[in-house]
Amino acid sequence: QVRLEESGGGLVKPGGSLRLSCVASGFTFSDSYMGWVRQPPGKGLQWVSYISGDSGYTKNADSVKGRFTISRDDSKFALHLEMNDLTAEDTAIYYCARLQWQIPQNYFESWGQGILVTVSS
Amino acid sequence: QSVLTQPPSVSGAPGQRVTISCTGDRSNIGGGYAVHWYQQLPGTAPKLLIYNNNNRPSGVPDRFSGSKSGTSASLAITGLQAEDEADYYCQSFDVSLSAVFGGGTKVTVL
């Protein structure tokens, strides 16, 4: 079965950086669009970023553009999110997700358990 | 402020039917992009509940159904059960291929 496991979260000071990782199993990782969705404490879901199976296409939400970079290492079945210039508004649980990609029917098919990122001095 | 609009909460007695609306515009739902629904039980990760407007993944009870019309969509839960108490989110894409979510609806079983 599909398994997604996030790591790399924790406490970071404002202006700092953090790198999240997600290791995948149970499906053909290299063929899959992958993404990140976050959830601030007590709030709703916010899409953050996604990347195509061949890494040729990436897209970020406006709220993280220029600060966050998504990447993947298909040899290690791993997805990454490099987060820079972090602010308190980035505090959230970050979920790794597999996307089903068939425009106009794109959706988040499978989700990891999530990892908490806290930005605070 | 979420791109898709959902009611913050709905409630119903066990066995009743409840519906959750999800309203977008011509750049997302009305532009032909499908609507999908996720269920988030307390303290857990979201789970895909309905995809492509009205399809249920394997294992999702047929008490859950979805529909879409114009710039809106709805999720219906018939025969409401205590275990359905959760947050529900709608999701679509827009013309710029950004994923968009609703603000979430908390379902309470009275």
Image (spheres, coloured by chain):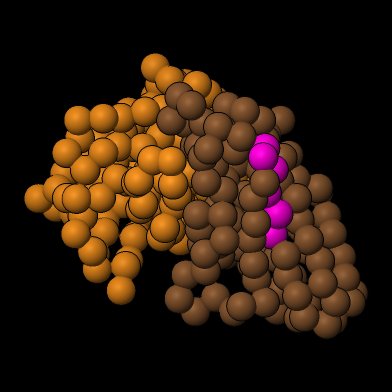
In reply to whether residue B85 is colored magenta, the answer given is no
In percent of the image, x 38 and y 40: which residue is there?
A103
Q: Is residue B71 above or below residue B66?
A: above
> What colour has chain A?
orange
Q: Nearer the viewer, residue B36 or B10?
A: B36
Q: Position of residue A5 (x, y in %)?
A: 34, 60
Residue, far left: A75
Magenta stretch secondary structure, dominant:
strand
Q: Nearer the viewer, residue B95 or A76?
A: B95
Residue, far top: A66
Q: Is residue A109 above or below residue B94?
A: below
Q: Nearer the viewer, residue B48 or A18?
A: B48
Q: Is residue A68 above or below residue A79?
A: above
Q: Is residue B21 visible?
A: yes
Which corner quadrant of the image does residue B82 belong to?
bottom right
Q: Position of residue B20 (x, y in %)?
A: 76, 56
Q: Position of residue B74 (x, y in %)?
A: 70, 54
Q: Nearer the viewer, residue A43 or B103?
A: B103
Q: Quadrant of the C terminus of chain B?
A: bottom right
Q: Is residue B15 above or below residue B45?
A: below
Which corner quadrant of the image does residue B49 belong to?
bottom right
What's drawn in magenta, residue-wise? Answer: B70-75
> What colour has chain B?
brown
Q: Quadrant of the N terminus of chain B?
A: top right
In percent of the image, x 29 and y 45: which residue is there?
A33
Give the side of residue B110 with respect to residue A2, left or right.
right
